[in-house]
Structure formats: structure tokens, C-alpha cells
């Protein structure tokens, strides 16, 4: 597989998402941090392993880097970026909070 080649479906990706995918390919990274559905879809078409913001928080809690996710989840709830409240609740449940 040509690491510099990216399959793009539709035109729903912005420059930041396209740049992130290109950087992932260039660095041959383990994961691509991306939350947007369109970006995840294109990443999966390109056999790119993705992880989202909540996945990063869960891993940090599991590894003892963060003692609690509650304050971080609250920051997400209060931010201008939309996260489904049910998904945020589920994330806390996954880490027994």
C-alpha cells in the first residue's frame, strides 16, 4: 500500500482533517486522533486506526495518568464542541465513575 496515497470519499473533510490524515501516513503513526464522523469514515477507508478524545481519556484513566475523568468530562459538557450527553455518561460508566 502506498503510504502517501489517501482515498477520499466526498468533499466533507476540511483542511485540518486532510492534513491530519496525511501526517498520520507520513509518520506511520499508530493511531489518528479524530472525532468527526466524516473524518473517521475516510480514515477507515484508508485502513487507519482511529481513536477519539474520549478514547484518549479512557486510556489515560486506565494507565493511571488521570485519577478521575469526571472533571474532564465536565469540561467537555461545558465546551462549545458538541458531545452526545449519553456518550459522555457511558464513558464515565466504562471507567466506573
Image (cartoon, grey):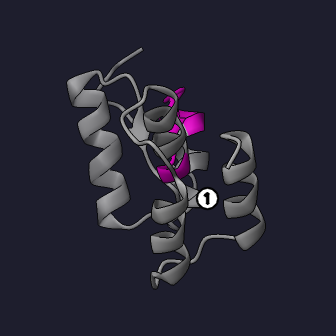
Q: Residue at x 40, y 38 (%)?
A: 32
The reply, left or right, for residue 73 in relation to residue 88 is left
Residue 48 at x, y = what percent? 49, 30
Residue 60 at x, y = what percent? 43, 36
Q: Residue at x 24, y 39 (%)?
A: 23
Q: Is residue 46 magenta?
A: yes
Residue 6 at x, y = what percent? 40, 37
The reply, left or right, for residue 65 in relation to residue 39 is left
The reply, left or right, for residue 92 in relation to residue 62 is right
Helix, strand or loop under label 1 = helix
Q: Residue at x 35, y 31 (%)?
A: 5
Instruction: Decide if residue 7 is in sight here.
Output: no
For residue 46, above or below residue 21: above
Q: Which residues are magenta?
A: 44-54
Q: Is residue 28 magenta?
A: no
Q: Residue at x 52, y 71 (%)?
A: 74
Residue 49 at x, y = what percent? 51, 29
Q: Nearer the viewer, residue 43 or 86?
A: 86
Please identify the residue farthest to the top as the structure is shown: 1
Specify few, some or many for label 1: CA neighbours under 10 Å numbering under 14, 14-19, or 20 or more.
Answer: few
- The picture quadrant where one finds residue 95 is top right
For residue 16, above or below residue 82: above
Which residue lies under the disc numbered 1?
37
Amino acid at each position: 500500500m502506498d503510504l502517501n496515497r489517501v482515498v477520499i470519499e466526498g468533499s466533507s473533510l476540511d483542511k485540518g482533517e486532510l492534513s491530519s490524515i496525511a501526517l498520520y501516513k507520513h509518520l506511520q503513526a499508530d493511531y489518528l486522533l479524530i472525532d468527526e464522523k466524516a473524518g473517521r469514515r475516510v480514515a477507515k477507508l484508508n485502513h487507519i486506526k482511529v481513536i477519539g478524545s474520549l478514547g484518549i481519556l479512557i486510556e489515560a484513566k486506565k494507565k493511571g495518568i488521570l485519577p478521575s475523568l469526571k472533571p474532564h468530562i465536565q469540561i467537555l459538557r461545558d465546551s462549545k464542541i458538541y458531545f452526545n450527553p449519553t456518550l459522555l455518561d457511558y464513558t464515565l460508566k466504562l471507567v466506573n465513575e
